[in-house]
Image (cartoon, helix red, strand yellow):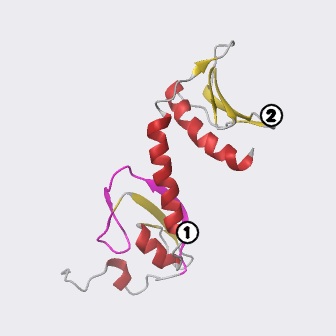
Amino acid sequence: MTHDHTDHGKWSEAGVPKKGWNCIGIDDLEEPSQTCEMCGTAEIRYVHYMQHPDYPEELAVGCICAENMEQDYVRPREREKRLRTLARRRKTWRRRQWKVSSRGNPYLNAEGYNLVLTQSGRGWQVIIKNRETERQQAGHKYFHTENDAKDAALQALLWAKDHL
C-alpha cells in the first residue's frame, strides 16, 4: 500500500466510525513518543483512549482527533490541561519537605489537608484528612516504597479536594 498525501489514517478508512466515540481514559507519556492511531501522523504526548460501540478496538489518539471523534471541542482540551497541570505539580511536589510525626510516620500539611504515610506488612499507604471537617480517607492501594507513596499522595490530595 502506498502512502500519498491523500492518506489520512483511519479517517479515510471505510468501516471506521468518524464520530460518536467516548474517551475512557487519558495518559501522559511525559514526552511526544507515540503516533496518533486515528490520523497516523500526529506525534502525541497526551494519549486519549477512545472507544466506540461499533468498533472492536480502542484507539489511542491525540487531542485534535479526540475532539473530532467526540464532536466535543472543550472536554478533550480540559482533560489534557489537567494532565499538564498534574505534570507541573509532580515536579514541585517531589521537592516538598515531609515531616515525621510523633509515631514516626511521614506527614505533610498541604492546602487544608493532612497527608500521612503509614507502613504495614502490606506496604506504604496514604491517609488523607480534611483539617477543617476532620473527614478522612485511607487509600486502598499499598506501595512498595515510601517515595512511591509520596508520589501517590499528590493524586490523593487532588481526589480529596473534590470528595472530602
Give the residue drawn at x 64%, y 38%: 111
Q: Return the mark for residue 146.
A: none
Q: Is residue 74 left or right of residue 122?
A: left
Give the amino acid type for the residue marked by disc 2 in the picture. Glu
Q: Position of residue 109 (x, y in %)?
A: 64, 29
x and y percentages locating residue 17 in the rendered image: 47, 82
Left or right for 17, reference 40: right
The front one of 122 and 86 is: 86
What mark, if any, has residue 134 been given in the picture?
2
Q: Is residue 30 visible?
A: yes
Q: Of callouts 2 and 1, which one flags the residue occurring earlier in the amino acid sequence?
A: 1
- Magenta part of the chain: 20-43
Q: In this rendering, is residue 94 above or below 64?
A: above
Q: Residue at x 49, y 66 (%)?
A: 77
Q: Is residue 42 above or below residue 107?
A: below
Q: Amino acid type of disc 1?
A: Arg
